[in-house]
Structures are given as structure tokens and as C-alpha cells.
Image (cartoon, rainbow, N blue to C red):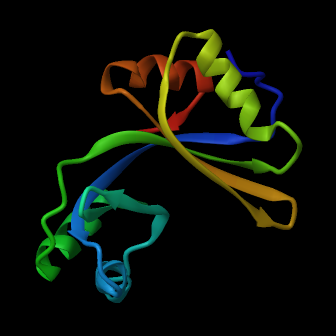
Amino acid sequence: MRDENMSDTVRKVNYYSIQISNKPGEAFKVLSALASAGIDLLAFTGFPRGRRSQIDVVPEDGRKFNAAARKAGFAFNPKKTGFVIQGDDRPGALADDMRALAEGGVNVTAVDAVAVGDGRYGAILWVKPEDVKKAARLLRAKGK
């Protein structure tokens, strides 16, 4: 179990993925359509997947996101669950959360993290669907 005295916040969140062409401007089309619709994203990540690219988005409001995505003609996959972590940047910041999951027997399938300045960092991580409840407990996650 992670130390409850840590200053990090962990949120259980819904995320949505879509496969797009691996060409310049394709992710921009998605992001600009969502921005034009006023969709606030907590996280965005993209990576190659075969000959295409996959992008994952974590919207603040899933209902507004779904309506905007449909209106823009994007066919995102059904929602899945992940975790967004934000906290004070320090050596080992993410290691503390990874340790809690490892000691609890939960495998992390993917993770992205970045120092965001002003002494803060953020991360998004994914676990298998069958491990979401256990991971939420181990991370003391808030949210959905």
C-alpha cells in the first residue's frame, strides 16, 4: 500500500483510444476538434502501433468528450480505466507508486510520466482490467 502521507494525488480515470494514420497532422486533427468543442484533457499520449498510430485521451468529462468525438466523426474505442498521478517532483516520485503496485502483485502494462515544472510531475498508468480495483486500493485512488 502506498504511503498515505505522500503529497501525490491519484485519480482513477476513464480513457479512450483511437487508431489514426501515422502521418503528420493526424493527431492535430483530433486534438484541434476536441479543443474547439471545449474538451479539457487530463492526459494525452500517442505511440506507433503497427503501420498506424494509437492515441489515448483522458478527458475531464467523458460525456462531453463522447458527444464531441461523435460530432467530429471520430470513432474512439469504448472507455477503459487508467490512473492519473500528480504530485511534488522528487527523486523516486513514481517509484513509490510502482513499488506499491509491485508489492501488491499488480503488473503495470504501460506508464508515461513527465516533470511539469515548478517542482511538480504527472503520470498516467494502465493496468489490466482485472487489476483496476486492486490497483485503485493500493494507490489509494480517488475518482470514478
Horizontal relation, residue 23 to residue 99: left or right: left
Residue positioned 64% across, 10% down in the render: 103
Residue 126 x %, y %: 45, 37
Of residue 130 and residue 46, the one placed in the foreground of this image is 46
**Image location of residue 73, percent across then percent down:** 11, 78
Q: Is residue 83 above or below residue 118?
A: above
Above or below, 69 against 135 in this view is below
In this view of the protein, can residue 140 be seen by the observer?
Answer: yes
Q: Is residue 57 visible?
A: no
Quadrant location, the N terminus:
top right
The correct choice, above or below, for 88 with respect to 57 in the image is above
Left or right: residue 56 versus residue 113 is left
User: Residue lying furthest front in this view?
Assistant: 51
Q: Residue at x 34, y 87 (%)?
A: 25
Q: Where is residue 42 in the image (x, y as percent from the top left)?
A: 50, 61
Comparing 115 with 139, the one in front is: 115
Determine whether, in the image, residue 134 is placed left or right of residue 16. Answer: right
Q: Which quadrant of the rendered structure holds the C terminus?
A: top left
Q: Nearer the viewer, residue 36 or 27?
A: 27
Tell me residue 59's x, y (percent): 39, 61
Instruction: Tell me where residue 102 sits by quadrant.
Output: top right
The residue positioned 54% from the left and 42% from the top of the image is 11
Which of the 4 image quadrants contains residue 56?
bottom left
Total number of numbered discs in the rendering: 0
Along the line of sight, the residue nearer the viewer: 82 or 99: 99
Residue at horizontal 59 percent and vertical 20 percent from the top: 101
